[in-house]
Image (tube, grey):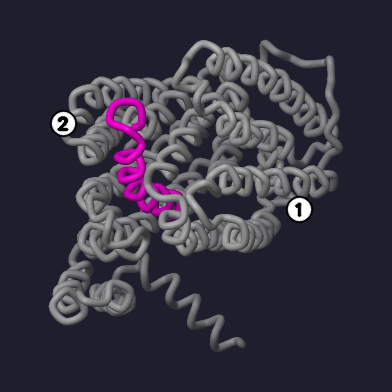
Amino acid sequence: MNKHTKSVEVNMVLNTVRTIVSIVFPLIIFPYVTRALQLENLGKITFAQSFIGYIGLIASLGFTTYATREGGKFRSDPEKMQQFADEIFTMNILTTLVAYVVLFICIAVFPNLKERQVLLVIMSASIVFSTIGVDWLNVIYEDYLYITVRSIVIQILSFILTILLVRTPDDYYKYAAIQVGTNGFIAIMNLIHVRQYCSLHLTKDIHFRDHIKPVLVLFSNNLAVSIYLNIDNVMIGWMVGDYYGGIYSIAVKVYTVVKQLLAAIYNVTVTRLSDYFAHQRMEEFRQLLNQVINDMIVVALPVSLGIFILAEPIVEIVAGKKVMESVFPLQILAAAVPIAVFGGAIAYCVNLPLHRESVNLLSTAVGAVENLVLNLFFIPVFKASGAALTTLFAEATVFCILMYHIRDYFWLFDQKAIVSNAWKCLASCSGILVFSFLGYRYLSSNALLMCVFVIVCSIISYLAINLLLKNINVERPMRRILQRFRRS
């Protein structure tokens, strides 16, 4: 095993901690930001983030995903790793320049963008910082301890700056600058940190033919994913105004951070799975894949149900009672959570290591077109709820296409164990229903207290029922936790 290779379980824990930190701090500060900026300015921020996200896709061009997958093959060969990293870095710099040309052309051509040019230019700095930050090197070497510590520091810094500087609706430029500025700090830290792996330089010796085809396929896939995930924010702002964009952004905020938390379970395994497949260690590949799927079932099912049931107090905590229009969109998106994360697991843990990017591209392209077309009809009528529905439909379509195209690889999955795990987890969710009923019955006047009561009691009952049902996917980690406590 390479000296840079870490325990998969440790990586999962660290990445989950990082994701939780990335979720908790924004959720804590989001109610303050919502009240300070108000919905219209929050909608402007969301619109700018979504639009710059598309421009950023031109800059990234699939390099991050490609480097994560391919770079794992060179970890034990410093010379090849240096050449590979220099090539990816140089090509990424070139595509970033192209992205900025496209951005300024769009601002010059479209009046709606010209009105927001200052905000767009501020937010666009994230494109540069993402390129020079080369975080893919940290992922290749599975340096999740550094990534986690860095994330905690950045979230604390962002939290403090937001409290100090963002106080009125006119401070939305400051808020945007804080979000981008912390990314800049990350980029500088990364450039210093990755020197232990390789020293990045621009190079003329680039093997374009080796890289360009898979990179373009991954770019097309990322573009399609971004369309069906972010086009809602852009189209709502464009079609029905920033107010409804703000309403929808609250539901999407919760939905997105939950998906990120669940995606942390499988994201850390992509490099390892790619390495297993490259060396045809298929039994290890199969074991790790099934571990990931079962871990996701254990977490995704209760989380989805919990968000659906607690949508009302969650929205009240996050944004206040005045924006309860976000409740129904959030409930719709809660139903999309397990569909989206299991689709992501198939795309990243099966298709990506097996070099089946074309399947990912097909599924996401169909989902993107479906989302775009349905938005034209649903948003004018149903506003934020319509956008949530189109996202749910798109996620379901993508998942079905992915499942159809991996039918020849079903042998990779321990289907009996997966089904057994799913049934036990569903049965264990009964406790969530009971404590949610009690929470609404006796604590509905205090949203925060109600959420704390329901979540804590639901977690305890969920784990207890799973243990009674002898669910090995819950027993195993619980046993390890107890063993570590005994040792300490």
Residue 248 lies in magenta, yes or no? yes
Quarter holding the C terminus?
Answer: bottom right
Q: Magenta span: helix, strand or loop, mainly?
A: helix
Residue positioned 43% across, 30% down in the render:
226
Task: Tell me which segment is drawn in magenta.
Answer: 237-261
Q: In the image, is 80 to the left or to the right of 444?
A: right
* Mark-to-mark CA distance, 1 and 2: 57 Å
239 is higher (above) or lower (below) than 382: above
Foreground mark, 1 or 2?
2
Q: Residues within 10 Å of mark 1 (few under 14, many from 20)?
A: few
Q: Is residue 342 visible?
A: no
Q: Number of numbered discs present? A: 2
Residue 34 lies in magenta, yes or no? no
Secondary element under disc 2, as helix, strand or loop, is helix
Q: Residue 249 appears at what percent x and percent y?
A: 37, 44
367 and 41: which one is in front?
41
Q: Residue 100 appears at what percent x and percent y?
A: 64, 20
Q: Residues within 10 Å of mark 2 (few under 14, many from 20)?
A: few
Residue 104, label in figure: none
Residue positioned 76% across, 31% down in the render:
85
Q: Is residue 360 visible?
A: yes
193 and 48: which one is in front?
48
237 and 193: which one is in front?
237
Q: Amino acid at mark 1?
A: Lys
68 is higher (above) or lower (below) than 152: above
Residue positioned 20% across, 75% down in the render:
444
Secondary element under disc 1, as helix, strand or loop, is loop
Residue 3, label in figure: 1
- Tell me the residue that label 2 is attached to: 381
Question: Which mark is first along the chain, 2 or 1?
Answer: 1
